[in-house]
């Protein structure tokens, strides 16, 4: 359990030893009278910017305003994505950790199942302006169905395709592709020697899992069946993963080097350096693109094209509901202060300023009064998030789905980069192994 507050410790001591308790209470009062600095609220933030150092700089400015308004000091630690889930799980099981934490919204149900987080019932949601103040799509990824959410949306994200307008002009491409077949044709025309048509982070298990899920929705596959069991090896699931890996293994519009690219910022580097003409990424990539020296007017964006026609049972989903949520540890000793921080982070002003800094989308409807989020690239991503995105299954084992399936896709990309054959048989074998790993770990039926 979490360390108890000084007040709680004092009450416990009083019950066991009244005399000693009196001494403790007097000392505690004396310390308070000496103006001891109140204990800091500990906040684990997710990495939203180009680096954790940039995140700390952005958040310090915002949190200084929070401290000035409330008198509550905050100690912020920005955790890289590759470490965040394990750190949160460690905190949830050990009882030692932060008061407030960011989390990937696809992990919401998994983390809620630990029972370590405050559930936002209607009374708590009312403190934040009510459930309807949040985007319905973002709120759909906040916890297990039928339960009060154990986190609330903080940053909104969706996937789309960034493209280099100059490269399009050089190749004589005058309109953006609207179907998957057109997209492949365009990517092939843009592939020239060492310059690829497209770049993706093939070693990122999270993005690999997102696209297995997304292409699966388009293909009519459901990686988790209606009983909550893993169903990774259906023909539709195999086809959806194969479609993603073929970009490197068969269509060759993605460089083999991408098999070692483990994060979106690394893909941004390839895009802005001219090594790739298109980049599949979330809206948060835009500030990094601009910081790399590529003018905003030279960067276009379009929704991810769909197969035409969609396979039987397919859904016209162009993104999953991406983003980060914020949660409060249930047994933390500073719950009220923690909830005040959540109120601050989801306020209209903070949402606008954080979204502006990170290139993310606000998750509260009143922030969209700002024209910055209803025009240009933000408008494209905003429409995708609100209307053409689907949530990943909100099940306790979702995080395990990401690590197993995302890892399988990573291994397939690694094989493709080495020139190994990647066909349906190889994909099915990798997914079968991932399914066994998930079941062996007690997940997915």
Image: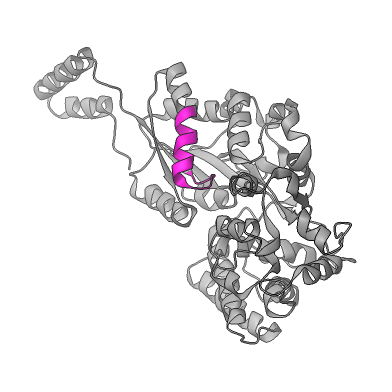
Q: Give left or right: position of 2 versus 254.
A: left
The magenta segment: 46-61
Q: Position of residue 433 (x, y in %)?
A: 56, 78
Q: Position of residue 103 (x, y in %)?
A: 52, 46
Q: Inspect the magenta stretch and tell me whether residue 59 lies in it.
A: yes
Q: How is the image coloured?
A: one colour
Q: Inspect the magenta stretch and tell me whether residue 211 lies in it.
A: no
All told, the count of numbered labels is 0
Q: Residue at x 60, y 72 (%)?
A: 409
Q: Residue at x 59, y 52 (%)?
A: 106
In the displayed structure, 227 sits above or below 7; it is below
In the depicted view, which residue is nearer to us: 415 or 28? 415
Q: Position of residue 198 (x, y in %)?
A: 70, 65
Q: Residue at x 54, y 76 (%)?
A: 436
Residue 149 visible to the viewer:
yes
Q: Residue at x 13, y 18 (%)?
A: 22
Magenta highlight: main SS: helix
In the displayed structure, 375 sits above or below 405; it is above
Q: Position of residue 145 (x, y in %)?
A: 64, 47
Q: Give left or right: position of 24 versus 281.
A: left
Q: Residue furthest left?
A: 19
In the depicted view, which residue is nearer to us: 217 or 50? 50
Q: Residue furthest top?
A: 33
Q: Which of the 4 quarters of the picture holds residue 225? A: bottom right
Q: Residue furthest front?
A: 170
In the displayed structure, 415 sits above or below 160; it is below
Q: Quadrant of the N terminus?
A: top left
Residue 117 visible to the viewer:
no
Q: Quadrant of the C terminus?
A: bottom right
């Amino acid at each position: 359990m979490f360390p108890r507050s000084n007040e709680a410790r004092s009450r416990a001591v009083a019950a066991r030893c009244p005399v000693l308790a009196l001494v403790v209470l007097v000392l505690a009062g004396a310390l308070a009278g000496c103006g001891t600095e109140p204990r800091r609220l500990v906040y684990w933030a997710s990495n939203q910017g180009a680096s954790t150092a940039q995140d700390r700089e952005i958040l310090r400015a915002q949190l200084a305003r929070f401290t000035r308004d409330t008198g509550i000091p905050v100690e912020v630690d920005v955790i890289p994505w590759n470490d965040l889930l394990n750190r949160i799980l460690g905190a949830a099981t050990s009882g030692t950790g932060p008061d407030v934490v960011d989390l990937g919204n696809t992990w919401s149900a998994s983390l809620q199942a630990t029972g370590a987080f405050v559930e936002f019932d209607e009374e708590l949601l009312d403190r934040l302006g009510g459930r309807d103040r949040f985007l319905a799509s973002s709120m759909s990824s906040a916890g297990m169905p039928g339960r009060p959410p154990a986190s609330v949306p903080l940053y909104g994200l969706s996937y789309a395709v960034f493209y280099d307008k100059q490269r399009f002009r050089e190749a004589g491409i005058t309109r953006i592709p609207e179907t998957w077949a057109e997209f492949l044709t365009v990517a092939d025309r843009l592939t020239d020697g060492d310059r690829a048509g497209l770049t993706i982070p093939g070693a990122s298990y999270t993005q690999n899992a997102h696209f297995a899920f997304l292409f699966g929705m388009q293909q009519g596959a459901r990686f988790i069946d209606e009983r909550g069991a893993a169903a990774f090896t259906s023909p539709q699931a195999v086809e959806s993963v194969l479609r993603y890996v073929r970009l490197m293994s068969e269509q060759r519009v993605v460089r083999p080097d991408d098999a070692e690219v483990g994060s979106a910022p690394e893909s941004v580097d390839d895009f802005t350096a001219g090594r790739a003409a298109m980049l599949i990424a979330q809206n948060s990539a835009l500030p990094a693109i601009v910081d790399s020296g590529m003018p905003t007017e030279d960067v276009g964006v379009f929704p991810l094209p769909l197969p035409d026609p969609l396979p039987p049972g397919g859904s016209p989903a162009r993104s999953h509901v991406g983003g980060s949520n914020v949660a409060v540890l249930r047994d933390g000793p500073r719950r009220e202060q923690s909830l005040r921080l959540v109120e601050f982070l989801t306020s209209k002003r903070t949402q606008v300023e954080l979204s502006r800094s990170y290139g993310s989308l606000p998750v509260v409807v009143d922030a969209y009064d700002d024209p910055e989020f209803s025009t240009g690239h933000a408008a494209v991503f905003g429409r995708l998030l609100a209307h053409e995105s689907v949530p990943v299954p909100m099940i306790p084992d979702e995080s395990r789905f990401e690590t197993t399936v995302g890892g399988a896709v990573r291994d397939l990309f690694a094989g493709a980069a080495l020139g190994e054959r990647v066909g349906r048989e190889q994909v099915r074998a990798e997914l079968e192994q991932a399914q066994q790993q998930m079941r062996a770990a007690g997940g997915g039926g």
